[in-house]
Every structure is written in structure tokens, then in C-alpha cells.
Image (cartoon, rainbow, N blue to C red):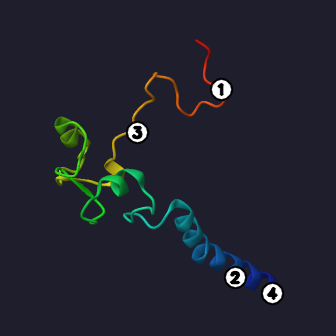
């Protein structure tokens, strides 16, 4: 009986210690940490501070304020605008050949 109890406690300890670390790695890091290869910030961040300032932003001037949710004058990966839609208005994630016209 003692062995079973120790086994259960060991399994619980493993789950509490190892699984959160594994899940964090799968998500790309801990909360607040930029994901490597993050498209928006990586593309526009010219000074390497992991955020996009108003001068680095290449979209319409009025859009910067719209996306700056916390009003800190910087855009983070979390505040990134949605990716542009395809030029023909079709879903760019669609599989298969383009529609015949």
C-alpha cells in the first residue's frame, strides 16, 4: 500500500513540475516572452527592442492607435494587426488549385 501511495505522489509531482514546462515550450515560451520568429515585430522592429514604435510602423498612421491596445506607444506581437487578406478576397489558406475564371 505504501508503494502505491508513493507512486501516486511521484506521478503527481511529475505532472506539477514537468508538464507546465513542456506546455510553455510548446506555446513558444513563458507569458510575456516574444516567440522566436514572430512575424509582425520581427519584420518591423528596426532597433531590436522587441516592439514596434510609431516610427517603425509601416501601416496607415491612424491604424497605429487602433492597434495599440494598452496605449504605451508601442505595438507588441500581441497587438499585431491581422495579416492582410489575399488580393482577390479569397481565403489564402484554401487548399487546391485556384478557381477557374
- For label 4, the crowd category at 10 Å Cα-Cα, with few meaning under 14, some 14 to 19 and many 20 or more, is few
Q: Secondary structure at mark 4?
A: helix
> Looking at the rendering, in which quadrant would you find the C terminus?
top right
- For label 1, the crowd category at 10 Å Cα-Cα, with few meaning under 14, some 14 to 19 and many 20 or more, is few
Q: Which residue is mark 1?
A: 97
Relative image position of residue 76 (x, y in whole percent): 30, 55
The residue positioned farthest toward the bottom in the image shown: 2
Q: Earlier in the sequence, mark 1 or mark 2?
A: 2
Side of 58 where 28 appears, left or right? right
Q: Which residue is mark 2?
A: 10
* Camera-nearest label, 2 or 4: 2
Point 42% across, 56% down: residue: 38
Q: Which residue is mark 4?
A: 3
* Camera-nearest label, 4 or 3: 3
As measured in the structure, the alpha-carbon distance from the residue carrying label 1 to the one carrying label 4 is 60 Å
In the image shown, does 27 or 56 lie closer to the viewer?
56
Instruction: Return the mark for residue 83.
Output: 3
> Looking at the rendering, in which quadrant would you find the N terminus?
bottom right
Q: Earlier in the sequence, mark 3 or mark 2?
A: 2
- For label 2, the crowd category at 10 Å Cα-Cα, with few meaning under 14, some 14 to 19 and many 20 or more, is few
Q: Is residue 14 above or below residue 91?
A: below
Q: Earlier in the sequence, mark 1 or mark 3?
A: 3
Q: Secondary structure at mark 1?
A: loop
- For label 3, the crowd category at 10 Å Cα-Cα, with few meaning under 14, some 14 to 19 and many 20 or more, is few
Amino acid at each position: 500500500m505504501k508503494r502505491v501511495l508513493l507512486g501516486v505522489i511521484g506521478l503527481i509531482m511529475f505532472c506539477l513540475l514537468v508538464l507546465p514546462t513542456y506546455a510553455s515550450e510548446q506555446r513558444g515560451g513563458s507569458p510575456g516572452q516574444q516567440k522566436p520568429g514572430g512575424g509582425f515585430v520581427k519584420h518591423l522592429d528596426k532597433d531590436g527592442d522587441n516592439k514596434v514604435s510609431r516610427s517603425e510602423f509601416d501601416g496607415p498612421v491612424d491604424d497605429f492607435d487602433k492597434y495599440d491596445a494598452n496605449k504605451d506607444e508601442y505595438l507588441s506581437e500581441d497587438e499585431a494587426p491581422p495579416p492582410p487578406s489575399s488580393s482577390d478576397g479569397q481565403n489564402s489558406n484554401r487548399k487546391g488549385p485556384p478557381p477557374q475564371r
